[in-house]
Image (cartoon, rainbow, N blue to C red):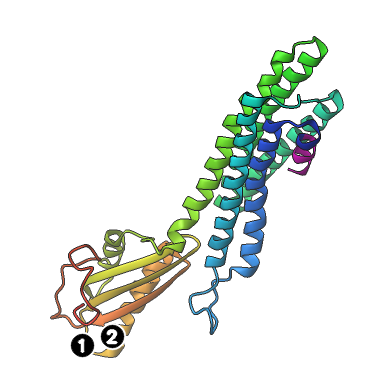
Amino acid sequence: MGLKGFVGFITGSLSLQADALHSVTDSANNILGLAASHFSSPIPDRRHPYGHQKYEGVAALGIAAFLAIACFEIIQGAVEKIWHGGDPVKISGGQLWILLIVLGINIFVAFYERKIGKEVDSPILIADAYHTMSDIWVTIMVLLGLIGIWQGEQFNLPQLQWLDVIFAFPVAILVFYSGWEVVKSNLPWLVDEMAIAPEKIHEIVMKVPGVINCHDIASRGIVGRQVFLEMHLIVDAKDVENSHKITEKVEEALEQKFAPIRIIIHVEPPNYESSNISFSSDNSNKTNSEL
């Protein structure tokens, strides 16, 4: 990222500057992951009884905002260059070799990360390896454009300078899309969107012996990161001890499927009936006492 940004600045290449910004998403995601593993702990404390993992989502929004502003600046610079002209891109063979080294580093990182991801069975590492691969293709596209500009300098073809502006637009759009992906992956966590379909939870819970029915199922969080789940459970038991045993079996079944997960269960007697598996527009205005 640093090498791309440095060469892009000294050559005045908008497409290379945009490519450096695209690398920011990959670098920022890795840094964010390291920081999140240290600071965004799911372990609750007095001030944060639901853990600290939303800090990661807030940081991700900051990264997305930075990318959106940077993307706007790149597109604005490209438009101004089209309308008013500007300094031509000056690139040397040595600078092209630096970019080829960068490309080699990216290729090594992508394949190494995918190899380790498969060895430790980490979907996060594997997904990040594919993201790095997309960065490789962008770098190849920008590099081809800069090689064309370099050839234009050698053969006195100034028209090839337009390659930089032409490639700046798709790369800037790709940067914006990367920022949107960061927002989209964290937005469900920040707005408490449903984490697990209530019908899926109902299906699992109903297979536990002693369960008559469950309803008013609510979940939030992100599966694989942290899920909070609550429900009303109707059990075939008349004493607290047996009811507790049934709820423990329900929790065990859900933890096997969706861990890490924190579950709150409100136990109800066998004669209680409810057809509301979860919440909808029909019961969204009910008070807690009515539920």
Vertical arrangement, residue 174 with respect to residue 245, above or below: above
Q: Amino acid at mark 1?
A: Lys
Residue 286 visible:
yes
For residue 53, what is the image quadrant?
bottom right
Which residue range is magenta in the image? 1-7
Label 1 element class: loop
Residue 121 visible:
no
Vertical arrangement, residue 217 with respect to residue 235, above or below: above
Q: Amino acid at mark 2?
A: Asn
**The C terminus sits in image quarter:** bottom left
Q: Residue at image x 48%, y 75%?
A: 50
- For mark 2, does the 10 Å Cα neighbourhood hold few (<14), some (14 to 19), or many (20 or more) residues? some
Is disc 1 in contact with disc 2, using a CB cutoff of under 8 Å? yes
For residue 282, what is the image quadrant?
bottom left
Label 2 element class: helix
Q: Is residue 139 left or right of residue 179?
A: right
Q: Position of residue 43 (x, y in %)?
A: 55, 76
Vertical arrangement, residue 178 with respect to residue 262, above or below: above
Q: Nearer the viewer, residue 272 or 79?
A: 79
Q: Which of the numbered marks, if any, corresponds to residue 258?
A: none
Q: Is residue 227 left or right of residue 161?
A: left
Report which residue position mark 2 lands on.
Answer: 242
Cα–Cα span, label 1 and label 2: 8 Å
Q: Which of the numbered marks, if any, corresponds to residue 238?
A: 1
- For mark 1, does the 10 Å Cα neighbourhood hold few (<14), some (14 to 19), or many (20 or more) residues? few
Q: Is residue 24 left or right of residue 188?
A: right
Q: Is residue 2 magenta-colored? A: yes
